Image (spheres, grey):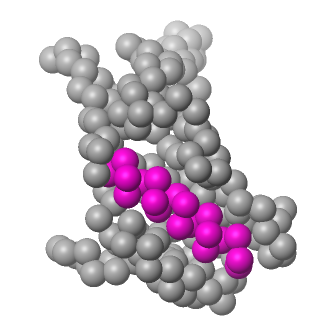
Amino acid sequence: MTVITTLRQKLCELFSADRAPSGYRPGVTLARLRRDLGLTTLDVNGLVFELVERTESQLLMHVVMTEFVLHVPTSTEGAGSFDVHHGGAVRRNGIRVRRRSGSQAMACELQARLLADNGLFEALMPLDFKRLRIDLKDRQWCVRLEHMGGSEVVNRMPAFRRYIAVSPEQRNQLLAALAGIKRALSTL
């Protein structure tokens, strides 16, 4: 039994989620993203945000993804978590808000605010994002936007690395979307 227990422990250590993937270079993808964005500071016209890097491991590869994190203080009480995504199966035909937790009324109000701001709507529609989550907790909105660009795919077999850049058009849409989300949430 000792051999099986030891083997199980070694397998758990090998596939542990707490361990950084083999070949992961912390901060390298963030540096490339900052270069793509042309930013020396994360304060653009009064819009202050953070860039966060996270990894997702698979069998012989991993993906390094970056998230844009924006905090917006509010007087709104309560808590909730909402996912924002494009509507339409084949073509984008709108913006949808899905409630993960919190009140459905807040989800409806959030969707109405996102759609009412024309500048925000025009920025979100062509924006290629994988995930956009908006959370409310302790009178603060936390926006986490994971763009399709600004990420790196690292494969071990066959060995390759591929960084997916953010185009200048996507950069402009991204910054406009973050500014629009801040505008919409600050009055909610």
**Residue shown at 62%/86% (left/top)?**
109
State left or right for residue 56 relative to residue 12.
left
Residue 29 location (% of width, % of height): 41, 26
Q: Is residue 114 in view from this perspective?
A: yes
Residue 8 visible to an observer of this rendering: no
In percent of width and height, residue 98 lies at: 51, 76
Which residue lies at the image location 69% right of the left edge and 54% below the top edge?
A: 71
Q: Is residue 7 above or below residue 106?
A: above
Q: Is residue 168 magenta?
A: no
- Which residue is depicted at the point 70% across and 70% down? 186
Q: Is residue 171 above or below residue 111?
A: above
Main SS type for the magenta part?
helix
Task: Give the left or right position of residue 70, taking residue 145 as reference.
Answer: right
Image quadrant occupied by the C terminus: bottom right
Image quarter for residue 167? top left
User: Within the image, what quadrant is residue 85 found in?
Assistant: bottom left
Q: Nearer the viewer, residue 30 or 79?
A: 30
100 vs 73, left or right, is left
Depth order, front residue of 46/83: 46
The structure residue drawn at horizontal position 57% and vertical position 82%, both measured from the top left corner, is 113
Quadrant where the N terminus is found in the figure: top right
Q: Between 112 and 170, which is closer to the camera in this rendering?
A: 170
Whether the magenta-drawn stretch holds residue 173 is answered as yes
Q: Is residue 169 above or below residue 30?
A: below
Which portion, as a residue range, is magenta? Answer: 170-188
User: Which image quadrant for residue 92?
Assistant: bottom left
Residue 25's x, y, as percent?
A: 44, 15
